[in-house]
Image (cartoon, rainbow, N blue to C red):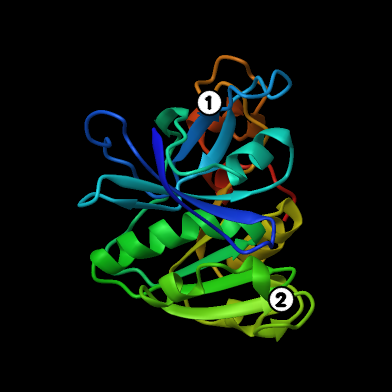
Amino acid sequence: MRVVDVRTNGSGYSELLLTPVNGLLPEILPGQFVNVRVTTSQRAYLRRPISVNDVNVEDNTLRLLVKDAGEATHIICNSRIGDVYDILLPLGKPFTIVPGARYLLVGGGVGTAPMLYLGKKLKEAGMTPTFLLGARTSAELMQLDRFRRYGVVFVCTEDGSLGTKGFVTAHEVLQSEFDRCCVCGPMPMMKAVAAAAKSRGVECEVSLENKMACGLGACLCCVEDTVRGNECTCTAGPVFNINDLKWQI
């Protein structure tokens, strides 16, 4: 796929807009991911899994929000318009969309990425989700204007530069009435939000960020212990209902 736009603000995050070199994008559902191959580094030989941030069918474009967290993602974050990547897509199991349900979408750090596309699809289905987004500082929240197109947005920053100071796990909106909760972000955050949802009888799905390589269930490096036994996160997930995970919450 070819890079047609790149946006960054110096916070360690970059937005990439890509389009197929040939043909049309396949159907991509919220919660699915892509696996990007970087060919300009011999050390970054494994593909990098990246959540789908948005899809525009009319423009035939895919948007990725990438955090500069290592050699491969550093190269991706510093892409230039015209760069071409070998990308496998779409991969993994998506979030569940239940018509008419009241949704709370919780994202922390780069875990906000899949929540944007999920919120967009919920809005298209006639629902108005509530977003709870967390980051270390306001500079890391590059897409707030887009989130506000699709629902009500609450923000937490660790340094207090925007929204409520602190972690999303302490935000009062978690005590509001919802039917479903979808979460992506650091593991401690996901477990805390999942525990809050479970205590209130709210159906909860989490998008796991296990280390992945092949994205096809062959290498077994992303295995997660579930009630059904060991399952590959890249194929059985990355989205799991918390009742299917052996989390002590």
Residue 54 lies left or right of residue 230; in this view the side is: left
**Gap in Å between the C-alphas at discs 2 and 1?**
32 Å
Between 158 and 13, the one lying in front of the other is 13
In the rendered image, residue 196, in percent from the top left (x then y), is placed at: 65, 68
Mark 2 sits on what residue? 157
The kind of residue tagged 2 is: Thr
Q: Secondary structure at mark 1?
A: loop
Indicate the position of residue 248 as horizontal and vertical percent values: 75, 50
Q: Which residue is mark 1?
A: 215
Question: Which is more toward the observer, 110 or 7?
Answer: 7
Disc 2 packing (10 Å; few <14; some 14–19; many ≥20): many
Query: In terms of image quadrants, where is residue 138?
Result: bottom right
Residue found at x 48% / y 60%: 115
Image point 73% across, 44% down: which residue?
69
Q: Position of residue 71 (x, y in %)?
A: 72, 34
Q: Quadrant of the C terminus?
A: bottom right
Q: Label 1 sits on what residue type?
A: Gly
Question: Taking 198 as reference, is 33 above or below it?
Answer: above
- The answer to whether residue 184 is visible is no
Closer to us: 92 or 77: 77
